[in-house]
Amino acid sequence: MKKSNILFCIALFVILFFTACGQNSKQSEEITWATTNVGANIPDGYGNYYTWEEAKTACPKGLRLPTINELENLLDEENVTFEWTTLNGIGGRKFDNGSNTIFLPASGGCRFVSYGTIEDVGTSGYYWSITERCNYNAYGLYFSRGLAYLLNYDKASRFSVRCVAE
């Protein structure tokens, strides 16, 4: 099976499973996002990569990991425009709700811990939320040029962290 077919099947499974679990409640409050990933000093910097356990304590004082609902708000097509774009030559997704705009760089992630390499840098972004699914998985945001959706993944994977204000 081609890699694109496998990725499509995985994406479809994640979307269907996530929807079936009833995690689609919206929040109406305004979220203040950090302007950079943890470990980066510029908005288009990739920053560091964290396991979910590490990510829970990675945000500086006054900031925290977003919830799955806060990540879901980024994908609310009625209130947010999101598109693939570049910032200083770095690919990523821009999310704009009319009063706030954030850029998340396509920093890739280490999804296969046994390999230990960061994959998909420049083509995909993986970002943790604080929301745990079970003993082994937690929720996060995935995006590429053509897709953006919520996922649940192995907590031992290494993803980027973008914090929100407490």
Image (tube, grey):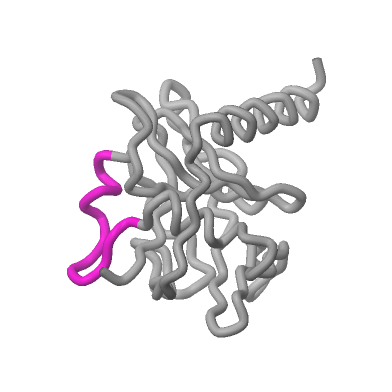
Magenta-colored segment: predominant secondary structure: loop
- Quadrant hosting residue 163: bottom left
Of residue 133 and residue 95, the one placed in the foreground of this image is: 133
Residue 54 is inside the magenta segment: yes
Q: Position of residue 11 (x, y in %)?
A: 67, 32
Of residue 144 and residue 66, the one placed in the foreground of this image is: 66
Classify 76 as above or below 138.
below
Residue sitting farthest toward the bottom = 99
Q: Which quadrant of the rendered structure holds the N terminus? A: top right
Which range is magenta? 53-65
Q: Position of residue 164 (x, y in %)?
A: 35, 67
Classify 30 as above or below 91.
below
Classify 157 as above or below 66.
above
* 160 lies left or right of 125: left
Question: Which residue is depicted at the point 46% across and 31% down?
Answer: 153
Q: Position of residue 113 (x, y in %)?
A: 42, 26
* 14 lies left or right of 154: right
Residue 130 is inside the magenta segment: no
Question: Which residue is depicted at the point 48% across and 34% down?
Answer: 152
Question: Which residue is depicted at the point 45% across and 53% down?
Answer: 69
Q: Position of residue 148 (x, y in %)?
A: 65, 50
* 105 lies left or right of 8: left
Question: Which residue is depicted at the point 41% across and 61% down?
Answer: 162
- Quadrant hosting residue 77: bottom right
Q: Which quadrant of the rendered structure holds the C terminus? A: bottom left
Of residue 44 and residue 163, the one placed in the foreground of this image is: 163
